[in-house]
């Protein structure tokens, strides 16, 4: 997962406003009366959010299961002389040397965990490594988005140096959406090289998320619509959850 994709992930996700996402996290910390110093990001990808939070004075630990993505993240941090600690670990079995003040897991990383049992593993580890009262903030692609907005749809972009086709298939029985992504990238000789990526995201209902949090002794303090503190709309595409350790 995220092998060749790491080389052009940022190019294809250029519309993500990481400053706005960091603003939202800081607003959430203030809303719930927290001022964290050390933050852990699960599923950090190419490190854009971790770097933005580091710029704002937070001490950051960022982990991801993809070495290719972490290499990109490390280069970003090096350019601003940030001492972010990057870890190549699976969030279902991560280990730290101590506890942290807050944990975040964003941009639908949770949807890549394809079973409720594994979600509970992640949440139990979150509870284990959070300081008392610490916040856990994460989002999910909603059932509506995965089944309807993305499911059984094809997207594409044609550019001079990179073109891609993104074909999605929604499995209503297993409640998963499979993304088949094909890239055509122009090399130095002017020829196009093909790269294929396959990703699967799992639909989780609000009840499943809340039950998993409760089973991990995490108290849910809010369920919100995309980058807001309003209740999710019926057709919400991204849902944020904020939980805390007692």
Image: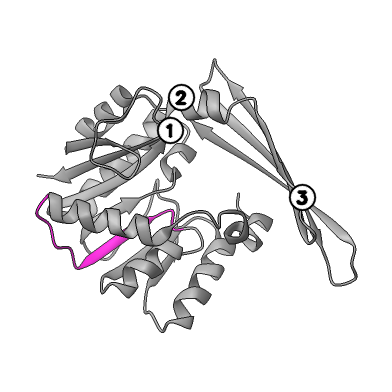
Indicate whether residue 40 is drawn in magenta: yes
Where on the picture, by quarter, is residue 244?
Answer: top left
Left or right of 212 in this view: 150: right
Are dots 1 and 3 in contact, CB under 8 Å? no
* Residue hosting label 1: 237
Mark before the other along the chain sequence, 1 or 3: 3
Q: Badge 1: few (under 14), some or many (20 or more) residues near its Cα, within 10 Å?
A: some
Span highlighted in magenta in the image: 32-44
Real-space CA distance between mark 2 and mark 3, rounded to the nearest whole angstrom: 27 Å
Where on the picture, by quarter, is residue 169?
Answer: top right
Are dots 2 and 3 in contact, CB under 8 Å? no
* Residue hosting label 3: 158
Residue 156: x percent and y percent? 71, 42
Q: Which residue is located at x 22 percent, y 64 percent?
A: 98
Real-space CA distance between mark 1 and mark 2, rounded to the nearest whole angstrom: 6 Å
Residue 93: x percent and y percent? 39, 49
**Residue 225 against residue 205 in the figure, above or below:** below
Are dots 1 and 2 in contact, CB under 8 Å? yes
Q: How many marks?
A: 3
SS for dot 1 = loop
**Residue 10 against residue 149 in the figure, above or below:** below
SS for dot 3 = loop
Left or right of 199 in this view: 113: left
Q: Badge 3: few (under 14), some or many (20 or more) residues near its Cα, within 10 Å?
A: few
Residue 190: x percent and y percent? 89, 67
Real-space CA distance between mark 1 and mark 3, rounded to the nearest whole angstrom: 26 Å
* Residue hosting label 2: 144
Left or right of 78 in this view: 193: right
Magenta stretch, overall SS: loop
Tag of residue 24: none
Indicate whether residue 62 is drawn in magenta: no
- Of all residues, the one furthest to the top in this rendering is 173
């Amino acid at each position: 997962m995220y092998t060749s994709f790491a080389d052009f992930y940022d190019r294809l996700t250029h519309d993500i406003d990481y400053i706005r996402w960091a603003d939202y996290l800081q607003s959430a910390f203030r809303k719930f009366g927290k001022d964290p110093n050390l933050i852990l990001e699960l599923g950090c990808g190419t490190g854009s959010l971790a770097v933005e939070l580091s710029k704002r004075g937070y001490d950051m630990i960022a982990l991801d299961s993809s070495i290719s993505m972490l290499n990109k993240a490390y280069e970003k941090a090096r350019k601003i002389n940030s001492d972010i600690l990057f870890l190549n670990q699976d969030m279902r079995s991560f280990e730290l040397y101590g506890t942290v003040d807050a944990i975040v897991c964003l941009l639908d990383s949770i949807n890549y965990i394809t079973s409720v049992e594994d979600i509970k593993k992640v949440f139990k580890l979150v509870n284990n490594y959070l300081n008392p009262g610490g916040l856990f903030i994460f989002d999910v692609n909603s059932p509506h988005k995965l089944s309807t907005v993305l499911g059984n749809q094809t997207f594409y972009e044609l550019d001079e140096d990179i073109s891609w086709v993104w074909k999605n298939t929604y499995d209503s029985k297993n409640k998963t959406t499979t993304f088949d992504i094909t890239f055509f990238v122009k090399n130095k000789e002017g020829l196009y090289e093909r790269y294929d990526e396959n990703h699967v995201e799992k639909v989780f209902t609000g009840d499943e998320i809340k039950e998993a949090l409760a089973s991990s002794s995490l108290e849910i303090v809010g369920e919100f619509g995309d980058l807001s503190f309003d209740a999710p709309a019926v057709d919400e595409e991204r849902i944020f959850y904020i939980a805390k350790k007692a």
